[in-house]
Amino acid sequence: MNVSRSMGPALAGFLIHVAGGSVGLSYYVQAGFYAAAIIWIIQIRIPQSVTDSLREAKLATQSFSSSIKEGFAYIGGNRLLLGLMILGLVPALMGMPFMTLMPVFAKSVFHRDSDLQALLTMMVGIGGLTGALTAASIRGRGNGKLLICFASAFGLSLFFFSQSYLIPGIGVAMAFTLLSGFFQTSYITQNQTAVQ
């Protein structure tokens, strides 16, 4: 996922540049990749086990709303799991939208075109790939203190990225987008490891 997040924006920026600033070509290429992914997913065959049959029988007798209630009751009854869910949700809701705002930063803040947007999002992807590899190399089932440090560092890197326009050039902005990708992926990986 991080490789696609790194290479996708760079390719999109190049296609937008080739098309003279029009985004149409980029969307057509993206739609082609989605169509190929759907075709590959449809071809996957998963063998059914005995436990899958028992789980399906239980789900067939349970309504959707009772299943949702059971899930919330389970999370509410387990304080550790509830804390991990909140710690996973809050940074995602408060920090993830920065990727959606990347075109605004490129055009309105740094006064550049799609080339800078592609470069900044590529830095997020490279940081994310590095963060995933780093988190995978950490031993154990998820360290709570490290998780909180990664989530806090993600927020700080986003704050400093938002203030990077005060320093001339784009190097500082690139550094903080790289760090935000690193810490974002690191905290998500640590959180999911701890939940499992």
Image (cartoon, rainbow, N blue to C red):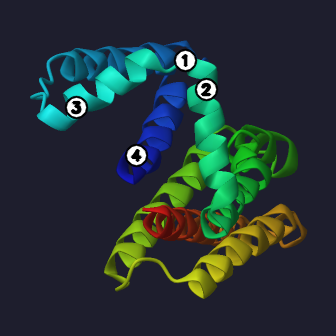
| Pointer 2 with pointer 3, Cβ within 8 A | no
The residue labelled by disc 3 is 52
Pick whichever of labels 3 and 4 is earlier in the sequence: 4
Pick whichever of labels 4 and 2 is earlier in the sequence: 4
Residues at marks 2 and 1, CA–CA distance in whole angstroms: 5 Å
| Pointer 3 with pointer 1, Cβ within 8 A | no
Query: In the rendered structure, which amino acid carries the disc numbered 1?
Result: Ser
Q: Is residue 122 above or below residue 163?
A: above
Residues at marks 3 and 4, CA–CA distance in whole angstroms: 37 Å
Residues at marks 1 and 4, CA–CA distance in whole angstroms: 42 Å
| Pointer 4 with pointer 2, Cβ within 8 A | no
The residue labelled by disc 4 is 7
Query: In the rendered structure, which amino acid carries the disc numbered 3?
Result: Asp
Pick whichever of labels 3 and 1 is earlier in the sequence: 3
The residue labelled by disc 2 is 66
Q: Secondary structure at mark 4?
A: helix
Query: In the rendered structure, which amino acid carries the disc numbered 4?
Result: Met
Q: Quadrant of the C terminus?
A: bottom left
Mark 1: few/some/many CA within 10 Å (<14, 14-19, 20+): few
Residues at marks 3 and 1, CA–CA distance in whole angstroms: 18 Å
